[in-house]
Every structure is written in structure tokens, then in C-alpha cells.
């Protein structure tokens, strides 16, 4: 969970993790009623965010946040790139987890 989500106690990342679905806030200021404590993102200069679940088979192991300094949603191309980044992050996390379990 990201620092902003941790400080707020909720946010798109938490919902993406729990639901396994992409959560998009096109305009944090306008859509803030969904996550009132997440407004701290605005003070950091962010205007919109997409939270993409990190999925492995039927399990969601986390979420990747893509923060933007502009209002709006990801293009279909950027959304595909974001999913690819989430997939790579998932593989990396699972690889690290299994490497730690291996006897040395």
C-alpha cells in the first residue's frame, strides 16, 4: 500500500487490491467524496490516479498506483502499458518471495 493510502487509511489502491479491479480517479478534487482522506494527494501535486491490481491467477497480491499531475484518464495505450508494469511487478514480487524461501 502506498504512503498516501497508508496515511489516508483508504484509497484507490486499497479498493483495487480488495476488488481485483482497476480503480480510476480522473479528478481527485472532484471525485474526492469517494476517498475524503485521500485529498492529501492533491497537496503532493497529483490530480488523478489509476490503481491497477497485481494479480497472480485468481489472487490479488497488491496494487500499482499510477499518479498523474493532470486531470484525466489513461489512454488505452497507457492503460495497456500500466497493466504490463503491474504484471512485471507481480512476477518480480513472486520471484523475490520464492527466492527468500530457498535454502542457501
Image (cartoon, rainbow, N blue to C red):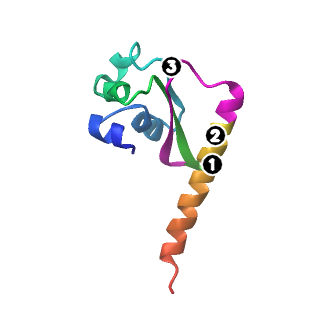
Residue stretch rendered in magenta on the structure? 59-80
> Which labelled disc corresponds to residue 26?
3
Q: CA distance from mark 1 to mark 3?
A: 23 Å
For marks 2 and 3, give the CA distance: 17 Å
Could you say which quadrant of the image residue 14 lies in? top left
Residue 60: % across, % down: 51, 47
x, y percent for residue 15: 42, 34
Residue lying at the far top in this picture: please name it: 30
Which residue is pictured at 28% across the width and 34% down the height? 8
Is residue 46 among what the camera can see?
Answer: yes
- Does dot 3 land on a helix, a strand or a loop? loop
State which mark lies toward you, 1 or 3: 3
Q: Residues within 10 Å of mark 1 (few under 14, many from 20)?
A: some
Q: Position of residue 22 (x, y in %)?
A: 54, 32
Residue on which disc 2 sits? 83
Answer with mark 1 or mark 3, whichever residue precedes in sequence.
3
Locate residue 31 relative to residue 10 in the image: left or right.
right
Whether label 2 touches label 1, CB < 8 Å: yes
**Horizontal placement of 35 versus 51: left or right?**
left
Q: Residue sitting at 36 percent across and 18 percent down? A: 32
Q: Residue at x 29, y 22 (%)?
A: 36
Q: Residues within 10 Å of mark 3 (few under 14, many from 20)?
A: some
Is 33 located above or below residue 51 in the figure?
A: above
How many angstroms separate mark 2 from mark 1 (CA)?
6 Å
Q: Which mark is residue 87?
A: 1
Return the residue nearer the eye: 67 or 101.
67
Amino acid at each position: 500500500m502506498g504512503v498516501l493510502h497508508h496515511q489516508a487509511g483508504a484509497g484507490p489502491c486499497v479498493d483495487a487490491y480488495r476488488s481485483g479491479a482497476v480503480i480510476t480517479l480522473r479528478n481527485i478534487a472532484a471525485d474526492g467524496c469517494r476517498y475524503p482522506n485521500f485529498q492529501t494527494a492533491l497537496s503532493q501535486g497529483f490530480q488523478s490516479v489509476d490503481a491497477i491490481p497485481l494479480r497472480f491467477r485468481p489472487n490479488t497480491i497488491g496494487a500499482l498506483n499510477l499518479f498523474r499531475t493532470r486531470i484525466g484518464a489513461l489512454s488505452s495505450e497507457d492503460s495497456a502499458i500500466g497493466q504490463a508494469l503491474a504484471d512485471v511487478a507481480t512476477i518480480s514480487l513472486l520471484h523475490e518471495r520464492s527466492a527468500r524461501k530457498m535454502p542457501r
